Image (cartoon, coloured by chain):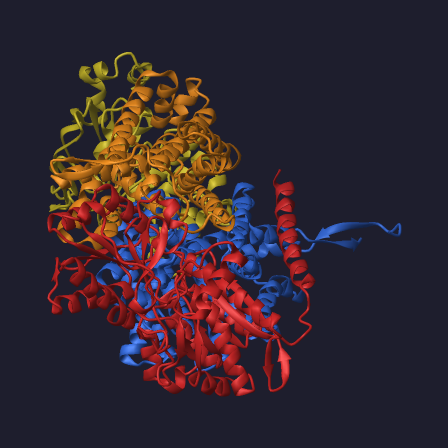
Amino acid sequence: MDILIYGTINSMALALMALGFALVYGISRIPNFAHGALYVISGFVTWGFVRALGVNYLLSVFLTMIIIGVVGALIYRFILIRVRGMAISEIIASYAIGLAILEGLRWGGFKGMTYTLPVFVEGSVDIAEIPVDFHRLVVVGIGVAVVAFLWLFTHHTRIGLALRGMAQDERAALMLGIDSDLMAVVAMALGSMLAGLAAILLLPLGNIVVEAGYNVLILAIAVCIVGGLGSWMGAVLAAFLIGFAQILTVTYLGSHYQMVVALLAIIFTLILRPSGLFGQQKELEERV
Amino acid sequence: MNNEQGRKERLDRGIKVRTDGLYAIMSLRELCYLTVPRLVLIVGLLILPLVMPSMYWQRVISIVCIYAFLALGFDFLAHFVGLVCLGGAFFIGVGGYLAAILNTSFGFPPLVTIPIATLLGGAICTLLLLPCLPLRGVYFAIVTLMYPLVLMRIIEALNILGGTDGIMGVASFANRWIEQYFVILMVLLFLFGLRRLVNLDIGLVFRAVKDNDQAVRASGMNISFYKAIAVFVASALGCLGGACLVHIYMWSGISLFALDFSILPIAATVIGGAGTVVGPVLGCFILVPISELLRAFGTLRIVFYCLILVAFIVFRSEGIMVYGQRKYHQFERWVKI
Amino acid sequence: MNNQPILEVQEATKSFGGIVAVNRVSLDVHDGEILGIIGPNGSGKTTLINCVTGFIKMTSGKVLFRGRDISGKPPHKIADMGITRTFQIMRPYYSLPCYKNLVIPLFSPRAKRTGGWRGGGKLGDRDTVGIDILEEIGFERDSFVPYKIASSLPTGYLKRLELARCLALKPEIIICDEIFSGLSMSEIASMVPLIERLQMDGITLIMIEHRLRELFRVANRVMVLNFGEKVIEGSPEEVMADDKVKEVYFGSEEVEEVMSHA
Amino acid sequence: MKKKSMWGIIIVVIVVIAAVVIYYATRPPKIEPGIVIGCPLSTAFLYGWDAERAITLAVEEINAAGGVNVAGKKRPFKVEVIDTRDLEPGVPVSEALLVVEKLILEKKADFIMGGPVRSEAALAAMDLLSKYKKVSILTTGVLTPKYHARVAKEYDKFKYCFRITGEAKWMVGGEIIPCLVDIGERFGVDRIFIMIQDVAHARGGGGLIAKIMAKKGWHVIGKPEIYPTGTTDFSMGLIKAKKEKAQVILIWMDMPETSILLKQWYDMKIPALPFGSIIAAAEQPGFWKATEGKGEYCLANVVNAGNAPSEATPWTMKFVKAYKKRWNIEPEGYGTSTSYMAPYVLKDAIERAGSLKPDAVIEALEKTDMVGVYGRIRFDPKSHQVVPSVDPEEGAVGTIFQWQAGKRVVVFPKKIAMGEIQLPPWMKK
């Protein structure tokens, strides 16, 4: 029973982390290695609003999402747009920006363990005599809401359809009058907002630490690859797969294999089925 | 300028066409035109340790040479074989651990453990990378980026090979000069070795695999066999670097798999000029000393070094060496008619 | 000409998901013969030869080469046996000069074993042998063509380079995939004698073409494919006379024009 | 566009190099021949910057009092701190070793202090120190008993390495076990659940505690739960502890994620007393505000007294007040008081040896005997490890404190205790 509850919580956390990365790669084919940095910087920005400026919590959450969305858009607009298409340069450019942000934060004095965010709601409740705190339930709730919103957004709004069009085939979308660069900027902004949302939800559980940036990036990549690069629905499913796998290894195999699970998942998926659950990398190879 | 008739004449007039083809070079002027840059490089590398102010900077040069091995391996794989391998740390780690084990448990001296660790490490890395050879583009890059992290976690979880403390008391080189010149000679050896390999027939096959692997398959050659050879060459280079590093620092542990070993060689290749085998080595000689000089600034140094990297990539300049080569062939001198 | 066919395809079928590209096609080719395969676009011609040369795994059916079953083998093993092919979309090595393009096939195990084109693979220096082959297919030795980078060559030259790449392996069968398409009339005119000379050298040819006039002049037998099924097989004259072929090509003037000339 | 961008790059690179050259040129040349102390510390982390602050405070006090008289001549200390980044994941240890060499070769450091903070870097640095014959006093971060074991094993090779901070074996045997036994008797608890980080010293310490407590009749629940660095979810372990009715949860982690563990423990109202043998997050004064009080009742061990206000020796409170005045924050991590004592011990040894030569200073250090911030400081001549004890008059005293109502109250050892251990309300039956 506890495996079920904490499995879902862990999986929803993974899904939130990975959604931003999956969305950006799905639409603009850019592996956004600065995802972890956006996650951490949104944590510190919210901390700034709440603790330093004393702005009330909900307003600061809203402001942070806007700021992070703008930061993501700027990164794409001025840096990534020039390197689109060249696989190796995209990875290095986005990773270098991520590293610069993280190390800049560390140099700016954001080190140590005293930076935290307040929890949405205090206290905990026993579900079938398993203690679960409200904040984690809120995380699951918002996670489900985000997935539903994304599904509605991509299926029923004009921008959403344009984004999906571009995800399938950029040139075809261009021909239909969709400005692919603008769409990519929107995708990057949306992806960063999702990273910001994940940070605001997950960081109150512990404290804001610069190292979290690296771990989040690795977990996000693991989930996206298992789910098939390019399809965010696959990422959500893969998040549940890896989430439960981690919880199961902790209970049965021993807790120190936990991190190894996510990394091995990547290696095996890529070797057995490079396109993951929903990706379409396989079909490209067939065309001789 | 007096009023004599004169015109600008390209230095390499006549040389470039003939040297590209199969004809021999005659005059001394043409001979030194071609060999001078290479000589400057070799002599420069050899006298560098002598001219260095303090022993600390000599140690920095050894670190530069280790990164140079990785950069050579990466450039060879990425530009000549089309496999973008972000796993430099994987080779360093495997090579380092092998050298440490050979030295501590079997007691071989450094000059014996390094060759064994290089070849054995190269074989092991190739075997481990075999399953992901058919992958393409971003996938191969991400898998190779993940390999060192997986090994790091596995060694940490199973607490083997000395666990998180690593292996201590590895013998160091006999003395400073042997260590310094051994590493520099190795860099020169592999620099010109790779340049020659790339122009050999097998080098052409690697380039063909990069251009169009279906065509290579249609001419009756098994591409994964040739990709494996290319990966073996690159991983042997990386393991050589790892082994030297372990003997320089008399220690080997899981932090040999750190990300720095994967990212810096790529940055050096981008700045030095991908495609020219000398470019990455030049990139290392620029990047590592700069990051040492900036050490006083603490973590700001990483920010500097990332911004320089992004600037190079975004302005998509082809790197110093390629720019240099292009300019070198365009030198002109004023010739009287 | 012993009666045992050099290459035999039995009931080859291949389907991508629901669509059946090739539906139980069987054919056989005798030594030194030229077999033409024609059919409208999308009739499964390229898929058929992709299956024969191992680039795609067949859903069912068998391919026999000199009686030995080679259906499951990877493409490089089939090429190693002597069944070479050119590609419909040309695949030269763009970054290498012409004669270096030929060094790669000369480097293959088959070239080393069989000595390659006139013993070039094992004994001679591969660069000069490359230039010999280029001269064989019509590029004079001292012209600038062998030294130009492949990417700067026009389509006609690239098609010949594809052919040269097959020749370097001293092949027994060459499968040409639309080698005439995209060439000007004069280029085709100079290509036909080259094909005839290959046939005289004892090389079997399977040619997929849309240019029926040149094909009929060269081919011994012709096979017509439509929607993945074999419609008819026979000498060029029988095929032209058959009304089913007219129906397949209904409305294409070219067939009418060829018919009227014949 | 291509030409202009190329020049843009070259200008950027030149500007960077020029800035660096100017920085080096304008540094004040070393006028008076100060004794250079090199400190390779990971300044971006708690154990790095707290040691840096303590050493700077001590050196300022010594220089103000006239510096060190070396055979009659008065010479001030001069501190050179360089960031080793060795606590950062993904940074190779060779970087830290390069920093140690830079201090020795370029900055001409006479002594190394504080030492690389991560245990594997410190162990690796031992070979370097013996190669360059530099005396080093380790004050923070490194707990592994392997360090002084190596000194004892190859004395003449590693005699240059001293350690002034407590080490894991004594901490477990001399402090944690007696404190646990004391808790056992007072509250009648004997079921312990161990959660440790996947690091060599944690595995060693955790395993040792499990064995000893089992011998003492305690019921050790399952094997120690090992968590890799960077774990963000401890729910399964805590639920297992609750199901098995554990009464004490022993925590040995120095990663920042321990605050997640404590918050989850508080939210889930697990009826067990969290006993942090090493719990980095809980050592800092800022911990209380950071966890909004959820860290209540958590016990933490700061290896040496003085890192939390207590009355170990008259000097302790003087140090705590001086630290608070200088850096307007109470002493934080467990490297603070030891790093503060190291310059004093070195000054005393140099004055007794009358010279800076390594061998003379080593003999003087081996005969050190002074009452410091955390008790009487003496070095074991064989292993150069500070002699620990429970009584401040005898040797270096450790401290275990408990968070009570927002303040760190020292509860063990008895001699310097300022208060009693309390149980969380939801534990009292």
Residue D137 visible in the shown view: yes
Q: Nearer the viewer, residue B25 or B51?
A: B51
Q: Residue D378, relative to residue B266: is it above or below?
A: below
Q: Residue furthest top?
A: C251
Whole-percent x and y of residue B308?
Answer: 55, 49
**Which image quarter is the C terminus of chain A in?**
top left
Q: What is chain C's hue in the picture? A: yellow
Q: Residue A259, relative to residue D49: is it above or below?
A: above
**Which chain is represented by orange in the image?**
A
B50 sits left or right of C79 in the view: right
**Which image quarter is the N terminus of chain A in?**
top left
**Which chain is represented by blue in the image?**
B
Residue at 19%, 42% in the rendered image: C31
Whole-percent x and y of residue C176?
Answer: 30, 36
How many discs mark residues in the rendered view? Answer: 0
Whole-percent x and y of residue B184?
Answer: 50, 71
Q: Residue furthest right?
A: B3
Q: Residue A8, relative to residue B173: is it above or below?
A: above
Whole-percent x and y of residue D202?
Answer: 27, 63
Q: Nearer the viewer, residue A135 or A194?
A: A135
Q: Quadrant of residue A166?
A: top left
Q: Nearer the viewer, residue B91 or D266?
A: D266
**Which chain is represented by red in the image?**
D
Residue at 46%, 69% in the rendered image: D315
Residue at 44%, 67% in the rendered image: D316
Q: Nearer the viewer, residue D300 or D130?
A: D300
Residue B189 visible in the shown view: no
D88 sits left or right of A252 in the view: right
